[in-house]
């Protein structure tokens, strides 16, 4: 009996230590079993306490009266499947007549407390079926991306971890253009760094505009097809991209072949249905700080600014079919940057907002999409750099956090994928000047003279 007590005490101590130091290990060893038992045992009472049950049907009440039996209890949604994952549980339930998926979304916080889980999100899978995705620990505290993220595609890269334990992907086929805002030290640059590192392994052309003299993107220049580090060069680069876009549309027009004997599947209006040997290389344009392109102090700078914003708006409106995608980053993105900014922002489907200094900055990203996303953005803590709210024009949003990627590691990734850097004739004039790798000599060491 003594040895059993010691063993149980040791197991309990190990469990507490893992839960404190390694919550992911604790979940895989002890947490899954405890949570599954807790959910199954408490399920009926929790559904009743949260108002997610329905009264018994009329025929059951009638049968109870006819047989002189007690009145039947309210019925909870039927469990279809309970599946553990590496970060939590996935509970799929079948709704009863009269229930709505919104009821489960509104009760998510109460379900989280009742099942003693870190987070609960609800979404409708199909008519009458709701999936509750529960996380067993704070997956955003120490972000650990899976070694091989499933679901990656030609223009789809994993960049962050969602609060529900899933991987967040930046899908350029679904959201061609995106906006990324955030205050200083909010993790905006690390998000951009993860994005470039993910795109480096794909067959895409990276084009960068970094008006901070290239301090953010120049170290990754070996993977960039074109790079501009000042507003003057950026204006010329954007004009070249607009001309390249026109050439791509001419290619698409020549290859449409609108004749009666051509199958519908072979008629295309974008580059993705072109034959592989004719398809132009897709381009991702990364703008590090859009305010540096929009601010001006003189008349000449104002003309350059209008030229830049006009080119960006044209690329945002017409670039998707030509395989040109925009990733616009900045601390603020409001109408105070001048005319054309609101039109440009309206074309950016994807929205990512890191920690901001005021609610107005959050409204610039999500004010026209979701008030709840604005509230979630202003609640991001300062001790959680990299945490952001990601959404799109449909109104859906989710909290994410990017893993910390050092600049040295990002440079190593870019250099290892340098052979994938394509050459685009229209952008040859903006090919980045690669710094030569100079070996720094070690400092001389002064030696004391030998004693006489």
Image (cartoon, grey):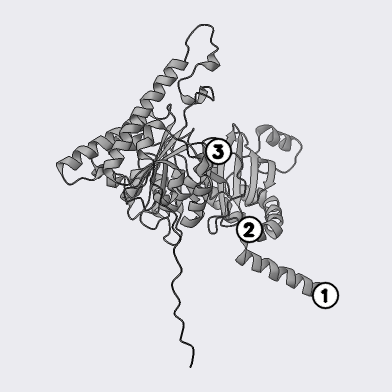
Judging depth in this view, the residue of 151 and 366 nearest the camera is 151
Position in image of residue 436 (x %, y %) = 42, 52
Numbered circle sitting on residue 24: 2
Q: Residue at x 36, y 56 (%)?
A: 184
Give the answer, above or below, for where 85 lies relative to 156.
below
Give the CA separation, mark 1 to mark 2: 29 Å
Kindly check if marks 1 and 2 are in contact, taking CB atoms under 8 A apart as contact. Answer: no
Q: Earlier in the sequence, mark 1 or mark 2?
A: 1
Q: Quadrant of the N terminus?
A: bottom right
Position in image of residue 41 (x %, y %) = 70, 53
Q: Point out the residue furthest to the left here.
A: 299
Numbered circle sitting on residue 101: 3
Q: Quadrant of residue 392?
A: top left
Give the CA separation, mark 3 to mark 1: 51 Å
Kindly check if marks 3 and 1 are in contact, taking CB atoms under 8 A apart as contact. Answer: no
Q: Residue at x 48, y 39 (%)?
A: 421
Could you say whether the residue bearing mark 2 is in a helix, strand or loop?
helix
Does residue 169 appear anywhere in the picture? no
Position in image of residue 324 (x %, y %) = 42, 32
Numbered circle sitting on residue 3: 1
Judging depth in this view, the residue of 187 and 58 nearest the camera is 187
Q: Earlier in the sequence, mark 3 or mark 1?
A: 1
Could you say whether the residue bearing mark 1 is in a helix, strand or loop?
helix
Mark in front: 2 vs 3? 2
Q: Point out the residue furthest to the top here.
A: 260
């Amino acid at each position: 009996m003594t040895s059993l007590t010691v063993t149980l005490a040791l197991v309990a101590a190990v469990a507490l230590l893992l839960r404190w130091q390694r919550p992911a290990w604790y979940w895989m060893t002890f947490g899954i079993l405890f949570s599954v038992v807790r959910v199954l045992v408490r399920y009926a009472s929790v559904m009743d306490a949260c108002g997610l049950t329905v009264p018994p049907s009329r025929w059951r009440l009638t049968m109870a009266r006819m047989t002189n039996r007690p009145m039947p209890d309210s019925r909870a949604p039927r469990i279809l499947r309970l599946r553990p994952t590496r970060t939590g549980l996935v509970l799929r339930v079948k709704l009863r007549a009269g229930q709505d998926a919104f009821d489960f979304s509104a009760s998510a916080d109460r379900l989280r407390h009742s099942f003693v889980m870190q987070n609960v999100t609800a979404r409708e899978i199909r008519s009458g079926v709701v999936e509750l995705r529960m996380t067993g620990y704070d997956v955003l505290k120490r972000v650990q991306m899976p070694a091989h993220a499933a679901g990656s595609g030609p223009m789809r890269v994993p960049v962050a971890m969602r609060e529900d334990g899933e991987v967040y992907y930046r899908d350029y086929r679904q959201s061609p253009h995106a906006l990324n805002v955030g205050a200083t030290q909010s993790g905006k640059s690390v998000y951009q760094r993860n994005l470039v590192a993910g795109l480096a392994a794909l067959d895409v052309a990276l084009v960068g505009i970094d008006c901070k003299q290239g301090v953010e993107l120049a170290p990754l220049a070996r993977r960039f097809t074109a790079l501009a580090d000042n507003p003057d060069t950026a204006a010329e680069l954007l004009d070249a991209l607009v001309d390249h876009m026109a050439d791509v549309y001419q290619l698409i027009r020549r290859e449409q072949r609108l004749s009666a004997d051509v199958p519908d599947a072979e008629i295309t209006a974008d580059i993705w249905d072109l034959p592989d040997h004719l398809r132009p290389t897709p381009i991702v344009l990364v703008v590090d700080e859009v305010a540096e392109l929009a601010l001006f102090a003189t008349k000449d700078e104002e003309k350059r600014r209008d030229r830049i914003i006009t080119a960006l708006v044209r690329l945002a409106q017409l670039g998707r079919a030509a395989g040109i995608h925009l990733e616009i980053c900045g601390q603020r993105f409001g109408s105070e940057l001048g005319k054309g900014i609101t039109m440009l922002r309206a074309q950016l489907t994807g929205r990512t907002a890191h920690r901001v200094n005021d609610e107005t900055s959050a409204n610039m990203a999500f004010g026209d999409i979701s008030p709840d996303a604005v509230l979630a953005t202003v609640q991001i803590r300062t001790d959680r750099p990299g945490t952001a709210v990601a959404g799109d024009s449909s109104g859906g949003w989710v909290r994410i956090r990017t893993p910390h990627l050092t600049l040295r590691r990002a440079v190593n990734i870019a250099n290892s994928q340098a052979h994938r850097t394509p050459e685009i004739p229209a952008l040859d004039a903006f090919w980045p000047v690669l710094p030569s790798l100079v070996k720094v000599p070690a400092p001389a060491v002064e030696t004391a003279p030998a004693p006489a």
